[in-house]
Image: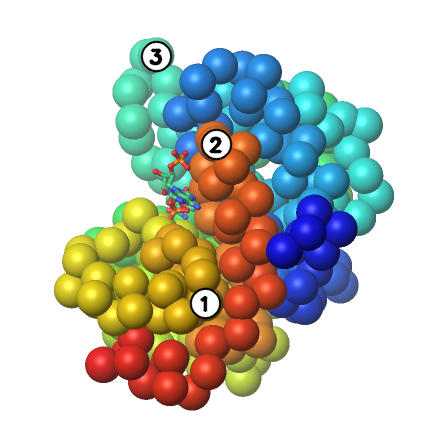
Amino acid sequence: MSSDELTAAAAGTWKLGDLTVNRMGFGSMRLAGSPDREVALQVLRRAVELGVDHIDTAAFYGPALDLIREALSPYPDNLVITSKIGPGDSPERGFHNATTAAELRVQLDENLRRLGVDHLDVVNLRIMNQPGESLAERFHWLTEFRDAGLIRHLGISNVSPHHLDEAEAIAPVVCVQNRYSLETSRSDDAFIQVCADRGVAYVPFFAIAGTTGTAATAVQTVAKSHNATDQQIRLAWTLHQSPTVLAIPGTGNPAHLEQNIAAAAIMLSTEDLTLLNA
Ligand SMILES: NC(=O)c1ccc[n+]([C@@H]2O[C@H](COP(=O)([O-])OP(=O)(O)OC[C@H]3O[C@@H](n4cnc5c(N)ncnc54)[C@H](OP(=O)(O)O)[C@@H]3O)[C@@H](O)[C@H]2O)c1
């Protein structure tokens, strides 16, 4: 593939509310793994240059918010930054989960301040999903932040299907962000369709990192036939689950970034998908 053909647009677009994004996006959690700050900035700028217009982040991803601001601000008009609140990390409390409106507001304000914006495009309420856990009260607080103009659209993360019902009874949900890959959380196969039927984007995380090895031989066979890497096939497979799936692979490595974006153009055949799903 020539560098002219390398574009995140190759897998088409889907929507987050009224915002349209390329289905191949970028997750910023792994930027902390870049060999140095300059490489991390280079990865972010190159991602946007190659058509990435959907970046996932969180205040607890080390320097990710600051790197995004330094690399990309003033932000392109079409760039959608999605963050998540719920989990927090502070010197005083360590890693914790916000349980009050005030704690969620502190987390939201940190996102706004470090990104240098007056509102966030999309914010996911990320829950722990313990048995019997309800998200209703916290999601309601997020709607108050939205109504105050601090958030444009709401999503939910690490959730089960009943949480989508619970949230949608309160306000529109534009995305569900869950752990999902060829080899993990396949119980979400049906959930992806539920989301698709309701026009909700499904955004898998750990599409590459969630590798158990059980599908390794099939992945290698398909990768060889496409002259692709195993990781590219894993990403392409997620995009083939539904036109409403948005990929957010994370990397701090410029070469891996280009490979991930190239995966947007991989067309898996019915035979490939049968082999992978077996
Ligand atoms: N909602 C949640 O609870 C939640 C939880 C975790 C993550 N997330 C979001 O989801 C995004 C995706 O998750 P992730 O970044 O952990 O996992 P991922 O995209 O599945 O995989 C990232 C790992 O794979 C490596 N990698 C990436 N591209 C590669 C390639 N082309 N070839 C070989 N290795 C490659 C990365 O290392 P290199 O850096 O060396 O490439 C890194 O170790 C995160 O960045 C974050 O934004 C959300």
Asked if the residues shown at circle 3 and circle 2 are in contact, with their CB atoms under 8 angstroms apart, the answer is no
Quadrant of the picture in which ligand 1 is shown: top left
**Closer to us: mark 3 or mark 2?**
2
Residue 243 percent across, percent down from the top left: 57, 75
Separation (CA) of disc 3 from disc 1: 47 Å
Q: Name the residue under label 2.
A: 253
Asked if the residues shown at circle 3 and circle 1 are in contact, with their CB atoms under 8 angstroms apart, the answer is no
Work out whether 128 lies above or below 180: above
Q: Mark 3 points at which residue?
A: 91
Q: Residue at x 59, y 65 (%)?
A: 265
Q: Residue at x 81, y 39 (%)?
A: 76
- SS at mark 2? loop
**Closer to us: mark 2 or mark 1?**
1
- SS at mark 1? loop
Work out whether mark 3 precedes mark 2 in sequence or the reverse, and give the earlier one.
3
Question: Left or right: where does residue 225 sit relative to residue 148?
Answer: left
Q: Name the residue under label 1.
A: 226
Asked if the residues shown at circle 2 and circle 1 are in contact, with their CB atoms under 8 angstroms apart, the answer is no
- SS at mark 3? loop
Residue 157 percent across, percent down from the top left: 42, 54
Work out whether mark 2 precedes mark 1 in sequence or the reverse, and give the earlier one.
1
Work out whether mark 3 precedes mark 1 in sequence or the reverse, and give the earlier one.
3
Disc 1 marks which amino acid? Answer: His
Q: Which residue is drawn at 45% across and 23% down?
A: 34
Separation (CA) of disc 2 from disc 1: 22 Å
> 121 or 92: which is nearer to us?
121
Work out whether 256 lies above or below 245: above
Q: Is residue 143 visible?
A: no
